[in-house]
Image (cartoon, rainbow, N blue to C red):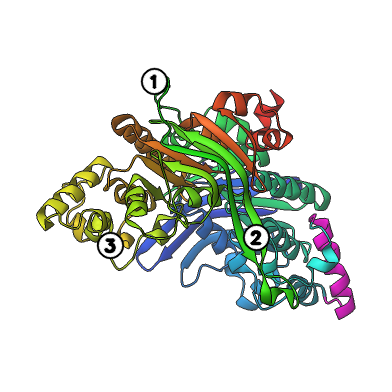
Amino acid sequence: MNTSPPSSSSSHLPLLQVQDLHVRFGAKAVVRSVSFSIAPGEKLALVGESGSGKTITALSLLRLAGDAAITGQAVLRGQRDLLALSEREMRGVRGGEIAMVFQEPMTALNPLMTIGAQIAEVLQLKRGLTGAQCAQAAVGLLAQTGIPEPARRANSFPHQLSGGQRQRAMIAMALASEPQLLLADEPTTALDVTLRGQILDLLSELQRKSGMAVLLITHDLNLVRRFADRVAVMEQGVLVEQGPVAEVFGAPQHAYTRRLIASQPRRDVVETPPPAGAAPVVKARDLRVVYPTPLPGLRGWFKKGEFVAVHGATLQLLPGQTLGVVGESGSGKSTLAQAILGLLPCSGLLEVGGQAWQQPATRNTPANQRLRRQVQVVFQDPFSSLSPRLTVEEIVGEGLRVHEPALATADRRARVEAVLAEVGLAEAQYPRLLERYPHEFSGGQRQRLAIARALIVQPQVLVLDEPTSALDVTIQQQVLGLLQRLQKEKGLSYLLITHDVDVIRAMAHGVLVMKDGEVLESGSVSDVLDAPQHPYTQRLVAAATPLDENAA
């Protein structure tokens, strides 16, 4: 097993040499004995699950880890130890020789300043340009990152840009000082699969042009295959393996690395189709969802315009089957899911269990309430979808209070305990389980709680809205395995909303491809993903395929 950085001769001095890095918060060690090097112009990926220490390692190099106690060495170009510099000297390094792109640009960018002003601020501080020079250079940097209409976008605020444009603006800001090393902390996690590929291609192109080195922090192994020259694997604060990407992925030496690589979604679903003539549990034909929009001028006083979010969608979901809906942000897939859940008014045919919603579906009539029991939802982020003020018993049992109000307290508690056991959360394993709050659980455990909350009312259909995108790869595999097992045991039908093609391949029987509110292509998973007909579907599949597979 190779855990030491490659040696370098004096003629090939590393850009950055990290030796025996330790990071502690109080008595807790979060990074231990980490050593690696980055050569000029190299792309190194630092991978591991949440809590492995990879982000803290990167922040420690810039001394941005708060009150952490940091020891070891981080020598830049064989001359200066970053960990021994004064705070004043570090200010010259941060955003100058070493720049950083953060995971979530919406929180990293100043909402009160235009994009151009934020880039100009870096140019003025780091390169001493005049105001006019800063404004011109900011537009040039935005153009370099591929943002359309860069002069106009320079005058936009962060909330006026899309997710991909905000990330490009962050990259432009990082490149403003012409850094020697770029630290990219999960720069594509919040982006769609095609945008992820675009951002990686952009970083690769900029890296080739400028000759800068890149330290990519990620848990997405497909991105590592596509982007990096070398990879370093972290587990619980320790660097367990590193080497060339092809070598580490082709013949991993450490058990943790093997587990990460093996954690890709695996297909384990019932392939036998329902009996001929089986009635669909969800059926839609020419489904249309429209949002009212304001009109300019006096016209807006008397009437509203409209934005059509879903154009004439047609689909059917059969018993015990999974229908995957895939597309980028803004494609209309979540709007379609909300209409099926009865949370948005719509037109056209829409039936759940053979019954139509009484329009507007948002009315809580007795008929609509009966339908709400038949179709439940599991959201993307369990931490924000679970009330922090309610205990596990209250969260999971809430549906019974609504749909079975006459149920005795003891019977309700027994039902809660039974459904928690079904999702892998038992009192024997988690003492005082029913009295705990969501913050006392990990991300994967919280998602199990969300699944239990949906199952407690015994629905026919679960709408799964990006159920694993906020989870690490190993936890993602566990949750997908749980959902597959529950489908087999209970005959559940899933409407799976996702932009992850690998999850569609693992879970779905049929797939719908959406873009700009329209269904572009539909059919079985093998037909649509293995032989896509529409150019947009072809781009989605290609963006989700590692470069080595594309080459094959």
Q: Main secondary structure of the magenta part?
A: helix
The type of residue carrying mark 3 is Tyr
> Mark 1 = which residue?
275
Camera-side residue of 501 and 251: 501
Element at label 3: loop
Residue at 42 percent of width and 64 percent of height: 24
Camera-side residue of 216 and 31: 216
Q: Earlier in the sequence, mark 3 or mark 2?
A: 2
The type of residue carrying mark 2 is Val
Q: Is residue 27 above or below residue 88?
A: above
Magenta residue check for 134: yes
Q: CA distance from mark 1 to mark 3?
A: 43 Å
The type of residue carrying mark 1 is Pro
Camera-side residue of 103 and 86: 103
The image shows residue 236 at horizontal and vertical percentages of: 41, 50
Q: Earlier in the sequence, mark 1 or mark 3?
A: 1
Q: Is residue 232 above or below residue 96?
A: above
> Mark 3 = which residue?
437
Magenta span: 128-146
Q: Which of label 1 and label 3 is nearer to you? A: 1
> Mark 2 = which residue?
101
Q: CA distance from mark 1 to mark 2?
A: 53 Å
Element at label 2: strand
Left or right side of 423 for 263: right
Residue at 55 percent of width and 54 percent of height: 19
Q: Which of label 1 and label 2 is nearer to you? A: 1
The image shows residue 359 at horizontal and vertical percentages of: 47, 55
* Disc 3 to disc 2: CB gap under 8 Å: no
